[in-house]
Amino acid sequence: MPQYNEKVMEYFMNPRNVGEVPDANGKGTVGNPVCGDLMTFTIKVEDNRLKDVKFKTFGCGAAIAVSSIVTEMARGMTIEEAMKLTNKQVAEKLGGLPKNKLHCSNLGADALHRAIENYLSNKEGRKGVSGVSEKPVKDGEEAPKGCKCPYCETEVQKDVPFCVKCNREIK
């Protein structure tokens, strides 16, 4: 069992903004087939700002804590500010995550970004952005890695101690 700090435990035991925004105008879902985490974010945008952000997450304690803190971080931000929210910022805001749980911080920011992309696509009347990321893995196919370094966002393999690009320890 990973060792979580007090802040992660607080956000896991008392998650904020759980559910769906009733009048959402953007929705994004991402998942990691390797670990089984699945996050869906719904957003309400008014005057180019995230007025409301909620989540539904199926996953471990870190995934729930990440989802919860991302909603708090993003609420009130402009679309542009929220699209700049990084996985590193999420992990740092939580005071760090065990190295085998860093992929959860990737999923939280990615799900938010996907919801914003869906909102922008709907607003502009474009088709093709469904708000869903990661195709289901079929028998015989290799699951996508989906894990990224929280410092430089380079794709890394699960359970590696260091990022090969920035050479920083992945905790």
Image (tube, rainbow, N blue to C red):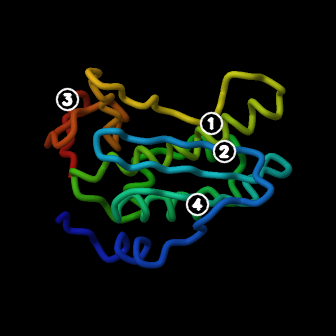
Whole-percent x and y of residue 142?
A: 27, 24
Q: Upstream in the sequence, badge 4 or badge 3?
A: 4
Task: Please state which of the two labelled residues, at mark 4 or mark 3, is closer to the viewer.
Answer: 4
- Is 5 drawn above or below residue 34 in the view shown? below
Q: Position of residue 44 (x, y in %)?
A: 76, 53
Distance Cα–Cα, label 4 vs label 3: 30 Å
User: Does residue 96 sit above or below 12 in this rendering?
Assistant: above
Mark 3 or 1 closer to N-term?
1
Which circle marks residue 131 in the picture?
A: 1
Determine the secondary structure under disc 4. helix
Q: CA distance from mark 1 to mark 2?
A: 6 Å
- The answer to whether the residue labelled 2 contacts the one labelled 3, judged by CB atoms less than 8 Å apart, is no
Query: Which residue is rendered at x = 58% and y = 64% of the image?
Result: 72
The one of 55 and 164 positioned closer to us in this rendering: 55
Q: Are marks 1 and 2 in contact (CB under 8 Å)?
A: yes
User: Which residue is denoted by mark 3 in the rendering?
Assistant: 164
Foreground mark, 4 or 2, reads: 2
* Location of mark 2 (residue): 27
Residue at horizontal 64 percent and vertical 46 percent from the top:
81
Q: Is residue 73 above or below residue 132?
A: below
Find residue 87 and report its horizontal and vertical position in percent. 43, 46
Foreground label between 1 and 4? 1
Q: Tell me which amino acid carries mark 2.
A: Lys
Outermost residue toward the left in this view: 161
Q: Earlier in the sequence, mark 4 or mark 2?
A: 2
Asked if marks 1 and 4 touch (Cβ < 8 Å), the reply is no
Q: Residue at x 76, y 59 (%)?
A: 51
Disc 4 residue type (three-letter): Thr
Residue underneath mark 4? 71
